[in-house]
Image (cartoon, rainbow, N blue to C red):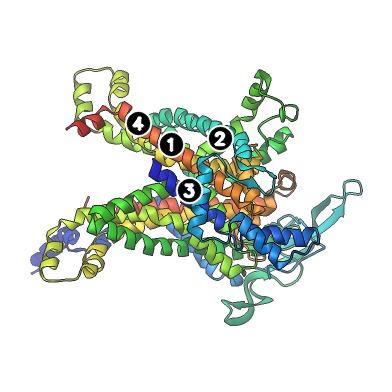
Amino acid sequence: MIIVLLLLSVVAFTIIQLPPGDYVTAYVAEMEGDRGERLAESDVIALRKAYGVDQPMYVQYFKWLWKLSHGDFGMSRQWQRPVIDLIMERLPLTVMISLFTLIFTYIIAIPVGIYSATHQYSIGDYVFTTGGFIGLATPNFLLALILMFLFYKYFGFSVGGLFSIQYMDAAWSMERFVDMLKHLPIPLIVIGTAGTAGLIRVMRGCLLDELRKQYVITARAKGVEERTLLFKYPVRVAINPIVSTIGWTLPSIVSGEIITAIVLSLPTTGPLLFQALLKQDMELAGSVIMFLSFLTVVGTFISDILLVLVDPRIRYEKLA
Amino acid sequence: MKLIKDKKREISKEEEFYLASQWQLMWRKFKKHKLAMLGGTILAIFYLVAIFSEFFSTEDIYIQHLEYIYAPSQKIHFFNEEEFHLRPFVYGLKKELDPETFRRTYTEDKTKRYPLYFFVHGDKYKLWNLFKTDIHFFGVKEGTLFLFGTDKLGRDLFSRNLYAARISLSIGLIGVALSFILGCIIGGISGYFGGAIDTVIQRVIEFLISIPTIPLWMALSAALPKKWSPIKVYFGITVILSVIGWCGLARVVRGKLLELREEDFVMAAKISGTSEARIITRHLLPSFLSYLIVSLTLTIPGMILGETALSFLGLGIRAPAVSWGVLLQNAQNVRTVALYPWLFIPGLFVIIVVLAFNFLGDGMRDAADPYK
């Protein structure tokens, strides 16, 4: 975990350093451009020294890392506020939406996968498979646009945002929460569709493999009731690969959340990152990416633990 | 004599399976997968049109028809009010301006009829910057032809979509080519040598896969200098897309190599003193090339979607270059789209192409192991 964190910090630092020029050149350009001030050469050098950008890259990196470990993520140029505050305002919503989406994905994908596998080549199976394919092929932002378009056309209102106007800046309360739940379905559908489609395919495939195995036939021959038989054995086995794919599902959900949030203008980290990138506010952008990736890694780690809980065979393998 | 001949034919039919090369068997199995064939055909058409986009388009994509802003698509007719015409035609557009809302509405002007012709002379262009000509696949000799309508500057969206196809479709291919090289080299090293190198590479791949791609792509492409020419940006985006793309491939290569490393023919090659690079490229790579191709086919749609998303946000390909994502930028505002739904057409193309790639990849995956 520590190593992963360090690697992440390297990536984030690289992103911050990517745009040509450094903090001071940007600052000087701003001073000269916007306010018409001229800075003397000696002032620029003094500034460079003060911000430490004249030092070699690795020294800068370790200084930056040192600050990070004390909770100091630097200042956002665009907002003139500490980066950590900005992120902490929006991150909980991102996490919440991602979690809801994950749950949504599983609630839909597992039953549908079971249905498709037990009713292979039925009309329902074809409908779900085709729908799944289309869901996989539609980019998130396009789906968001199409849904917004349909809602706008047939119900005459815009579905962007996560809160109604009166709750936009209000403190958390029961009403605000309910209001949010009302806005939640569209982002959930948009972000969850691709993941759901993928999971349905995995679930269907795994379950089909399981159903062909000998023990199912044996159980059936012994007169185990079909429903008990299905849920007690093959479904349990088929769920394992699904749990282990959280590691891939989570990054794609976070990715989807970012882009959907931009289109639907949700108050999460997506638009924050987008604006920061457009304004080349790299301190903010790098930190956002670092936080997002870190959460994803943590999520994957938790899913590994879950897998051990769900699938006892893994523990035995390690013991042996 | 005849009997022997018949016998021979029978045998050959039976043995055909064993005599056919691996590729022949794969092709036979692939042909049975109807959806994959369909996907392949669709893709072939799309790529053909994309390669010759200047020829298939009806207009120069930068010409602005200021009198036809946000014109709807003109439908191709075979019938006018009473009779059938063998030569299809479009009606002219009549514009009316709503005096209160200033909204333009276009209606078909039944009095003006513009027949369509094949191989008409139209706007001049240079095919691939080499051949100067002005022949277009089809078009009208007079009047206007907006099959997909026009955008806010009155530019023909049909032609723009075709040009966009070239960039959107090729970016996937070039990106995959890059990922292919990276994936093969890194996965090859990892799988062939094993041990500590393998562990390090695998950890790095796991780490890269765990980073959410879109934010990373966004950050990298936002860092491309603003002054870059469209071509430089294009290659920059391709490189960015393949930063993550190679990981999956490297895993496939590694897994297969680990399997094959223990085979006898590798041992034989080693004993006869073949160099390791040669063993990898001559003996190991060909034996799992089919898996590689499948993996590649399934990587392309991700790249196309990535490019579209980035360009849609304004971080990818930039105007004046056109890609489907750039065209979709026009559709960002719901109110605009509600009035001019034809702005969604590029999105439809993206979905079709990605679907086709998925079908193709599925069929190829089934065909990849013909001995099963």
Return the disc, 4 or 1, that comes first in the chain's sequence: 1
Return the disc, 3 or 1, that comes first in the chain's sequence: 3
Say which residue appears at 21% left-offset and 33% top-offset: A317
Q: Are marks 4 and 1 in contact (CB under 8 Å)?
A: no
Q: Residues within 10 Å of mark 2 (few under 14, many from 20)?
A: some
Give the CA separation, mark 3 to mark 4. 25 Å
**Tag 1, which secondary structure?**
helix
- Residue wearing tag 1: A298
- Can residue A132 be seen here? The reply is no
Amino acid at dot 3: Ser
Q: Are marks 3 and 2 in contact (CB under 8 Å)?
A: no
Give the CA separation, mark 3 to mark 2. 32 Å
- Residue wearing tag 3: A9
Amino acid at dot 4: Ile
Amino acid at dot 2: Ile
Q: What chain does badge 2 belong to?
A: A
Q: Residues within 10 Å of mark 4 (few under 14, many from 20)?
A: few
Q: Mark on residue B243?
A: none
Along the line of sight, which residue is nearer the eye, B47 or B236?
Answer: B236
**Tag 4, which secondary structure?**
helix
Assign the N terminus of chain A to one quadrant of the image: top left
- Residue wearing tag 4: A305
